[in-house]
Each structure stands twice: as C-alpha cells, then as structure tokens.
Amino acid sequence: MAGIENPAMAINSRINEPSSILHLRISIGGAIIGMLILWYESHIHPKITKRFSSLFFRRLVWQVDVAFIILIPIFVLNIFFGIIEDKLSVKLAVKESLAFMATGLFLSFFIYFYFLSILVSFLRRLHTSFGQHVFYNYLIERYTEPLEENRTFLFLDSNDSTRIAEELGHVKYSRFLNRCFDDIINAVKEYEYDIYQFVGDEVVFTWPASQNDKGQAVHMYLSIKNQFRLFDNLYRTKFGVRPFFKAAVSTGKVTATLVGGKMKNIAYHGDVLNTTARHLGLCKKYKRDILFTQFYLKSLGHPFFEHELIATLKLRGKANESKVYALKY
C-alpha cells in the first residue's frame, strides 16, 4: 500500500475512518491512559505530594500531571498508528500527530478522558477513604433493615491530644489531625476494610471477621506506626510534635443498620464497640501501644503474631471478667 505523504490527508482519513476502528483506537488509548493514571495515583502522586500539607496544591499537581498523562499517550499512539496504518515516515507521523492535536476531535478526546479521570479518581478516593464496601452498600441499601454481622473493630486514638491541641491551637491542630489521618489511610491502603467513623482525634476501622484473617488489625497498626516514623521530620518541622496513636482491637456480633433520615449513615450496635473502647482506655494504664481482647484472638484461629496476657479484670458494667492482651515484642 502506498504511504500517505500528506499529514492533513492522514488526519482526514483518521476522522472519516469506520466507527469500529475509531472505537478500537479510543479503547486502546483509554486502557493505556487508565493504567497510567492508576499507576501514577498509587505510586507517583503520593511521593510527589508528600511534603504538601495543602489539599489545594495536591489537587493542582494531580490536575497538571494527569493532563500530561493524557496528552503523551495520545501523541505517541497517533505516531504509532500513522507509521503502522498510514505508512508515514517517522517525521511525517510526528507532524501528523502534532496537527491532530490542533483539531476538534483531539479536544473532544482530551475533555472526555480528563473528566473520566476525575470521576475514576473520585471513586477510587471514596474506596480508599471509606472502604470498598461502603459505597456499594449505600447504593443497594443493604442495611435498610437491621442485619446481624460478626465484625472486627480497630480503634485508633491520638495520644496526648489535649496537650497537643493546647500547644498548636485549634486551627493548626486540625491541620495536624488531617495530616495524621491522610498518613493513616495511605499506610493501610493495601488492606480491605471500611472506615466506620472519624470522631475528633479517633478513627474506627471495621471489616467482617474471618478465620482467614492473619492478624490484619495488628499489621495495619504496625504499618501506621512505620508511616509516622517515615514522616517524623516533616511533623516536627511543620507542627513541632510527633504523632502517636494508641489502638485497641476486638471482634464480636453487631447489628448494622442505616440511620439518620435523609442524611443516612451506617451504624453498628453491639457490646463489641463498648469493649473495644474500654480496652483503648487501658493503653495508658498498662503503657502499651495496642491492646486486644480474647474475642479477637479466638476469631483468628491462629493469631500469627506473638502476644501476651497482661491483665484479667472486670470492666465496669460487665458481668464477666475480661482478658487483656498485648503484643509481645
């Protein structure tokens, strides 16, 4: 087949080609762009923006970077198709690709992929921030009627929050907590969980209890500690304090239901929440970072981590004694 020597002719042939071929090219381009954006958001964007505490600058960097991620594959793919299909030389294929980027068709492609990227990024952040099941459960109204579930709860609470709030003031303390919560979420993104709630300086994770759980709560907590360790200098420079969160874990039956009228939220009711909160309050007394109950250990089958019994006591309002366990370092 004789090559097309005029880039303008190549563009016209591209615009007027059969819709099936055009759809194939869009699909290939979309798949490549989607994978690049997913890779960028997972691995590159957190490293680039780790020193930005401002959400505005983080989103600005994302918008600029995503624009380039869309532009470059379209440019390169047009060169590729120009060489393979239109039999253009490399020089003419580059010219054709540059000329194509000045057309309305290219602008349509760019706008389509850009806003699709925003939508996908929003859904991904929803998944990361609240857990993979929350959005889906809202859509299907899973908890319109109360359901009984066996779940594990991980409570995290900031140490010395009153002292830190007094030192920083309310506004700076809020920025400090926002940065802490961002780092906590980034530290545990590889795990499957739902975020039940943020309450003041506390965050509560939950997930269905399973015999296949290999000590996820403990591994999540250690990942969070390591994340804070990595950014220790940043916290001391920006806030003058180092973050530290204590934790408690328990497993038990809860009733899950939607509450709140028009502003619906998933609520869990059950003794396990009260028990976990009581164990969280014991961290300071026993000078331990993380405590867990016998119910959590029993739910694991095999705990997959070293632990030790540090106390057997009767919690206020409880008929039976509770065993308090901690990590054995």
Image (tube, rainbow, N blue to C red):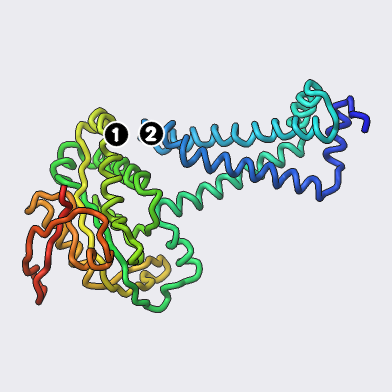
Q: Residue at x 47, y 71 (%)?
A: 141
Q: Element at badge 2?
A: loop
Vertical order, 54 against 184 (above or below): above
Q: Nearer the viewer, residue 294 or 48?
A: 294
Mark linked to residue 50: 2
- Near-viewer residue (37 or 146): 37
* x and y, in percent, of residue 107 in the image: 71, 37
Residue reaching furthest to the right: 2
At 45% from the left and 72% from the top, the residue drawn is 142
Judging depth in this view, the residue of 154 and 120 nearest the camera is: 154
Q: Is residue 86 left or right of residue 163?
A: right
Q: To which quarter of the image does residue 257 belong?
A: bottom left
Please tell me the numbered disc located at residue 231. 1
Residue 37, x across and y down, in percent: 55, 40
Residue 207: x, y in percent? 35, 62
Q: Amino acid at mark 2?
A: Lys
Q: Residues within 10 Å of mark 2 (few under 14, many from 20)?
A: few
Q: Earlier in the sequence, mark 1 or mark 2?
A: 2
Rounded to the nearest angstrom, the CA distance separating label 1 from label 2 is 9 Å
Q: How many marks?
A: 2
Q: Are marks 1 and 2 in contact (CB under 8 Å)?
A: yes
Q: Is residue 314 above or below residue 114?
A: below
Residue drawn at point x = 47 percent, y = 35 percent? 44
Assign a secondary structure to mark 1: loop
Q: Split into 4 quadrants, where in the image is the N terminus?
A: top right
Side of 136 relative to 309 (left or right): right
Neighbour class for label 1 at 10 Å: few (<14), some, many (≥20)? some
Q: Position of residue 49 (x, y in %)?
A: 42, 33
Vertical order, 315 against 58 (above or below):
below
What amino acid is at disc 1?
Answer: Phe
Residue 28's tag is none
